[in-house]
Amino acid sequence: MTVADFGDRLRAISTAEWTAWLRQQRWFGAKAAEPSQVRVGLLLPFEHEGHRWAVVRLDVEVAGTVRWYQVILADDPAATGGISTALLDEGFRRFLADAFARGWAVERGATRWAAVAAGHTPLIVPPDARVELGSAEQSNTSMRVGDVAILKLFRRIEPGAHPDVEMTEFLTTRHAFPYTPTLLGTLVLEDAGERTIAGMLQELVPGARDAWAYALERARPWFAGGAIGASGTGRDQDVPFAGDARRIGRITRELHEVLASDDDDEDFAPEAATGEEVEEWGEATRRQVEEALDLLASQLARTDGGVPPDRIAEAKAVLARRAHYLARIEELVDAVGDDAGFMIRHHGDYHLGQLLHSAGDAFMIIDFEGEPSRPLAQRRRKASPLRDVAGMLRSFAYAAATLAAESRADPATREVTGGRWERAVRAAFLEGYLGERDAEASDFLPEEPESVEALVALFEMEKVFYELAYELNNRPAWVGIPLRGIARMT
């Protein structure tokens, strides 16, 4: 079996066979759809020390739209059909990690897939280091390279700058932002002059876990102690994680200051937001509210339990206030007017799961990819940084609801405890974010505090109605969280 033979076998796989395999992959984002065609768009087979592997770009057509997915396959006689996923082989994972140190690439004609080190000091993986596949695979696939790096392979790809790589490079190699792990390298797929980012290598934060898990662990004993908390004092300064939230607020503000600091780079230069942009943000929120409420109405009309029985009364109450929500949007848009601050590059999908808490008690911001289902151009678009603020506030609401649901207290006590924890953590985060401003830094926020408050409320409303639609479609048992958020917010 030659490399060419292996490539021929891959090209001979049918659409039906590819579809069946893709539906078994957690990173494949169109499992419910029926692809009309799956074909090998690009194929780069290669051989190393007797092993045959291939980088493949699958072109998947669904409802007239073609999306690209990156897969790496191995010639494996022991596997069903003689083909297996290369990333399951530690030998291949080690080969890929070492590729950044030696500047390795595979080329076929005008097509090239290369590992490119960032900076002047390439990563050298210790000989005894293991390269292990991550267990939390979602839209991408991650590998831990010993105790030094994380290698992320992007699955859905498209040409152009990738926001995760672009933002991480801007923050860590151009501006030395201390709260994001350093970019160490990229995987690049080039074809006939078209450049696609296929993956990235990033510094590993030792002993880290995501801030969501950390927040829940910090607050569980307090929730177990009832509404006044385990300390028995009932003072907001005793609310666990509030101090951490204040730190996260300050770090988030520093992130936005750095992202707004370069007037010479057109991809990052701040742009003044006008009343026209505010109207567009209001219209986007109106669409989200209407779509979510239409979905809620259709779910309530179902006879097969579209909305959990214990949430039906709450859902009907929310549905009855449609006119109020739409009027509230108009109020918020009018309150902001032309005082909208600046649009900058921002995180775009900001929540507790996008921060790491290190063994040294530091918070690090990661995953600047944005929403993977959206096109790259949308994910790279500048917007008000207060979108990130609203996203984090909604994350606190989910954490409070999760902690309250775990509590063994009576429902009334759980509600009071959860509400008080969320209020205290929100206030601390906002205090950290909106506190003292660096006079020398570019000030990108609206001038008036009332405009800031109105914009945060507008973005938070858009977010909570998005959550309502998401939970109705994917996790109906969770629908109470956005329903409660809507009731409190409006």
Image (cartoon, rainbow, N blue to C red):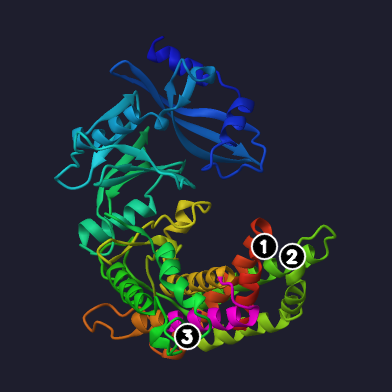
Residue 102, quarter of the rendered image: top left
Residue for badge 1: 477
Label 2 sits on residue = 308
Of the numbered discs 3 and 2, the one sitting upstream in the chain is 2
Earlier residue among tags 2 and 1: 2
* Label 2 residue SS: loop
Residue 419 circle label? none
Quickly name the residue at label 3.
453
Q: Which residues are magenta?
A: 407-427
Is the residue under label 2 in contact with that under label 3 (CB below 8 Å)? no
Note whether 470 is above or below 85 in the view shown: below
Q: Amino acid at mark 3?
A: Glu
Place residue 88 in its image quadrant: top left
Residue 349 location in percent, x, y? 46, 62
Residues under numbered marks 2 and 1 in contact, where contact means CB atoms less than 8 Å apart:
yes
Residue 5 vertical position relative to residue 463 in the rendered view, above or below = above
Q: Horizontal and vertical percent for residue 472? A: 68, 61
The 10 Å Cα crowd at callout 2, few under 14, some 14 to 19, many 20 or more, is some
What kind of element bears circle 3? helix
Residue pictured at 26% horizontal, 54% vertical: 206
State which mark lies toward you, 3 or 2: 2
Q: Is residue 72 magenta?
A: no
Residue plotted at (67% across, 62% down) = 477
